Amino acid sequence: MLSRTASELYWLSRYLERAENTVRMLDVSFTVSMMPNKEIAEQELIAPLKISSTYEDFMERYGIVNRDTILQFFALDTLNPSSVISCLNSARDNAKSVRGKISSESWEAINSTWIDLQAMKRSGSVGDASRFFDWVKERSHLYRGAVYGTSLRNDAFRFLRLGTFLERADNTARILDVKYQIENQQDDEGSLEYYRWVAVLRSLGAYEAYQDIFGDRITPEKVAQLLILRAEVPRSIRACLEATNDILQDIEGKSGQAAKRLVAVQYARIQFGDSDYIFRETGLHSYLTDFLARIETIANSIHTAYMEAV
């Protein structure tokens, strides 16, 4: 496969996953910001800006943090590279470049989503935030369903999946890290801690999984264990690395050996890791900071191996 084609497919799925992750991140912050404490509410609304490293840009152009400005910035602001509209625009451009490599149903899922979002932009609003979040998630599910249900199992399919899982692993780590830091900076009451971590679990589609595995009592340590170490949870870091490792093993050729080794090493660290090491010896923030650096190194290695013109 041509390096440019591999890159377009990879980034197509990264951008679509990023759009979904953006609204999942907003969903957590908007939910917890409804608590009566104004200081906590503002910190929760600032959290997406910290996760996406866009705080300075936002404050320079908007100046005030509230639900309306945050929603506008992350939904329809074309100057924000992390906004839903920016991600979908980039994904659609990539999809147009590789129309011959993706199924017609996959293209229609992307294109129809873009058309609907353009109508929202013309109206100047996405309407109710919760409905918008659900809409983006539903459209993302539609796209993935089309890809999984209609794609030939070849390298094009593998690069589509590769982009999804690397972006997802990065997002799960960022959400966990920022929410844990917020909690450590505050003297949370038990009810607020519970409310915040329930919101995190729900945003990542893992609340029912947590209940099945750990029961009703929710603690930060068990949430982190679920979202880092449990392979059976689709958005966990381990599940994402396992999928990434399997995908790379299925891509033939010698050019990707360095990337394959990096992923295999990181997957082994997760596979044989435990929560005591993360919390007692390393600390969650240090662990996740190290992981984010490693996942960036992995992404760069994959880019060098498969997406740079020879």
Image: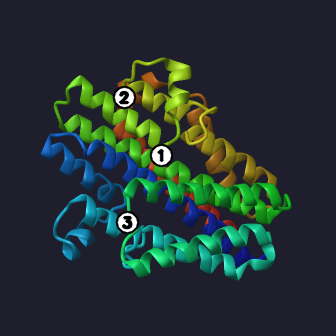
| Residue at which label 3 appears | 74
Q: Disc 1 marks which amino acid? A: Thr
| Residue at which label 1 appears | 172
Query: Left or right: where does residue 44 sit relative to residue 305?
Result: left
Q: Earlier in the sequence, mark 2 or mark 3?
A: 3
Image quadrant where residue 142 sits: bottom right
Q: Disc 2 marks which amino acid? A: Pro
Q: How is the image coloured?
A: rainbow
Image quadrant where residue 258 sits: bottom right
- The image shows residue 282, relative to residue 64, as above or below, that is above
Q: Nearer the viewer, residue 303 or 163?
A: 163
| Mark count | 3
Query: Left or right: where does residue 54 sit relative to residue 7?
Result: left
The answer to whether any part of residue 102 appears in the image is no
Q: Earlier in the sequence, mark 2 or mark 1?
A: 1
| Residue at which label 2 appears | 220
Query: Left or right: where does residue 188 sit relative to residue 293?
Result: left
Residue 301 coordinates in the image, percent (x, y) = 60, 62
Residue in the image at 56% along x and 42% along y: 235
